[in-house]
Image (cartoon, rainbow, N blue to C red):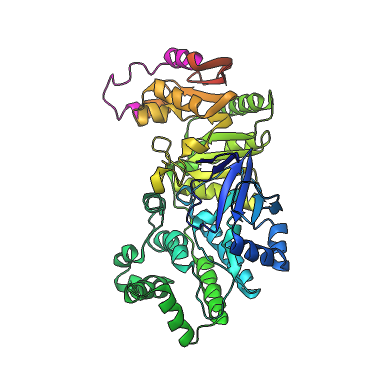
Amino acid sequence: MTIPDTGLRAEPGSFRDPANQVFHRDGDVLRGLDEQAARDYRALADTEFFRALLAAGKVCGTAPVEPVPGTPWTVVLRHERIPFVSHPYEWSFGMLRDAALLHLEILRTALTHGFTLKDGSAYNVQWRGVAPVFIDVGSFEPAREGEPWAGYRQFCQTLLYPLLLQAHLGVDFQPWLRSRVDGIEADQLRPLFKGVRRLLPGVPTHVHLHGAMQRRHATATTTDVRDQLRAAGYSRDLALATVRGIERLVGRLDRRPPESHWADYQRTCGYSAEDRAGKERFVETALAAGPRPRLVLDLGANDGRYALVAARHTDQVVAVEEDPAVVDRLYRRLRAERERRILPLVMDLADPSPGGGWRGVERASFTARATADAVLALAVVHHLAIGRNVPLPEVVDALVGLTRPGGRIVVEFVHPRDPMARRLLANKPVGLFPDYRPEVFERLLGARCRIARRLDLPSGTRTLYLGIVGG
């Protein structure tokens, strides 16, 4: 939605708190605050703890700007632009846990200095590469004695419960979060934690007791619950102790990535050393030539080998991989190496993240977010065309659709006689893919972009292309 006569475009995911809403204008990310929210922000901006969080990069860059004529806001803030917006169901276990720990650290620090967070959503965290950053500056407000953390239920549903699900039961949380924008309800989780599982860390208090309290107070108003807590002696010190306890719990939760076929792909995929060296040189040359790309998509990134090559020539790489265990290994490695230009995401390219939430646009689809200056599609076409039965013309259309006009596509075609393609074809009816041939692929690619370079790898069963979209 565009607001007439202001040039402002409303952020579809910012409507739940009318006191402060996010808009876009000419590439800027703006937040409008009403009178009460403006008072809260001024008080926040005067604190040392908030300035320290900004300086450490734990809260997104924020500064007041001139009010926008024709709008009702008392104060307008401009935020730094996050390189690529992602959703929690696209994160690995380690990413979700680190996002939860950042959220809790900020809340604990705020409570210590007389403030709190009125929200607890995982969507309030984004990423600069593999560094989490808190983006909901409008969530800060002065803490009131005797009131509980208003965002606790949200935090449980979108952060703690998914972590418990995977840490304790080994169940990937991504499909659960993708199916419900508000996260996992306590009543959905309770049946999974029966018997001895009831005693697993975090489950008695935050699943069973929390669920019981929700049922008990189902008909009570928020004011009623607050009054009861005050009467029972609930204090800010107790709130702080609760947050510290959750922080310790989350810090201990872990789920080391299990063994996976794809985790060792570089060793088992059948590339010769000559193939691998030629492929790296081709990618390096393709990205080094021409204008420096701001955003590169690495589709089917696996262990991040080529994402790391791309990172030398771009501001941001989004490395997409279907296997959550592989993404988690890559994330932990990048964190350890302090590589901040690569954002690894969990996603099935044959079933990418759709639009979700209110009217299907509250959370933008992957294709709506992912228009890149360069796209790497290395050893992925055969998995889509043969493994997932996606027609070859549609695979090409999808790659071109993710690339800006004038952008580059680096794509690898795996010939039908290649061992990996033959392995996929062995599980399909004979003759199902008569058009899966290099000459057909090259003709389709050439019809959608200008083929600037072509290289047959030494093995003779794989061909690399550099295509210029609109060129």
Frontmost residue, 76 versus 110: 76
At x 56%, y 74%, the residue is 244
From the top left corner, tell me how far across and down residue 108 is, in percent: 60, 71
The magenta stretch spans residue 437: yes
Farthest residue toward the front? 70
Residue 159 is left or right of residue 340, and the answer is left
Confirm whether residue 319 shows in the render.
yes
Quadrant hosting residue 306: top right
Frontmost residue, 223 versus 130: 223
- In the picture, the quarter occupied by the C terminus is top right
Residue 12 is left or right of residue 6, and the answer is left
Frontmost residue, 378 versus 320: 320
What segment carries the magenta color? 424-446
Relative vertical location of residue 9 with respect to residue 158 in this rendering, above or below: above
The magenta stretch spans residue 139: no
Residue 87 is left or right of residue 111, and the answer is left
From the top left corner, tell me how far across and down residue 279 is, in percent: 58, 26
From the top left corner, tell me how far across and down residue 250 is, in percent: 51, 66
Quadrant hosting residue 202: bottom left
Frontmost residue, 391 versus 327: 391
Relative vertical location of residue 271 with respect to residue 142 in this rendering, above or below: above
